[in-house]
Image (cartoon, grey):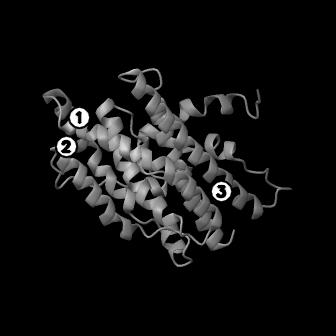
Amino acid sequence: MKPSTDSLVLYTLHLADNALMLGQRNAEWTGHGPVLEQDIAISNIALDLIGQARNFYQYAAKQINLSTDQSINPAVTEDSLAYLRNEHDFMNCLLVELPKGDWAVTVLRQFFFSTYQFYFYGQLINSKDSTLSAVAEKSLKEVTYHLRWSAEWVVRLGDGTMESQQRISNALNDLWPYTAELTTLADYEEALLKERIAVDLNSIQPLWRNKIDEILATATLPTPKNLETRTGGKQGKHTNQLAIILKEMQYLQRTHPGAIW
């Protein structure tokens, strides 16, 4: 692959992996939500994210197949990218692979990630890559709802009972170290910036932080200070939680390769 194509594939896989992993984590709530309405809401958000992942995987597969001799290597598909790669091949941020935790962890993580996606897709629409731009335009409509829903829950828990405030405070301290990676540029992102394909994460970081501070203040929650930053997922260095979730998620495809219903 040409360097620019290689970077484009990694970039697209990063976006797909982010959406797939968080969609998978949210799907663990299906049938277990605190009330029926919110059970449906978190399940729909999971479906939206997995739909975004599909669009990105399809594009990544197309790029890989165009640059690969398929007489030697079999064609790559969205399914093989999701179900047949090993943990170190995944490029998602660490934040999205962490266990779902309690409801406070789930809604706070969704808020952090949806805020990032909202500003990210808002700029990816302007990408010179027409496919990425189109996926961003479609996804932004979904993410706008995700952001509103999760922000309302953060405020509801933070400005609620002593129990709810304690749980969201614990979630905040646990998740905050993982948030910096959302707006930290990887090498493949920097390479695509020059071609006006990727989003400059430095430009959305202050937007992300302002929104986070606004909602945390409304929720009467202080922003954590001096917590160690944890990164590496965008370069394929993950927590042991990713291997665990992939083992479950990929079991059927790996046990019965190529099986169809």
* Residue under label 1: 157
Assign a secondary structure to mark 3.
Answer: helix
Mark 1 neighbour density, 10 Å: few (under 14) some (14–19) many (20 or more): many
200 w.r.t. 73: above or below: below
Verify CB contact (< 8 Å) between mark 3 and mark 1: no
Residue at 41%, 25% (x, y): give it. 37
* Residue on which disc 3 sits: 60
User: At x 37% / y 53%, what residue is drawn?
Assistant: 115
Which tag, 3 or 1, sits closer to the chain's start?
A: 3
Q: Nearer the viewer, mark 2 or mark 3?
A: 2
Q: Which mark is residue 110?
A: none
Q: Is residue 237 left or right of residue 62?
A: left
Horizontal and vertical percent position of residue 186: 45, 65
Q: Quadrant of residue 72?
A: bottom right
**Disc 3 or disc 1, which is closer to the eye?**
1
First-in-chain label (1 vs 2): 1
* Lateral position of residue 259 relative to residue 104, left or right: right
Q: Residues within 10 Å of mark 3 (few under 14, many from 20)?
A: many
Residue beneath label 2, please?
Answer: 219
For the residues labelled 1 and 2, say whether their Cβ atoms are less than 8 Å apart: yes
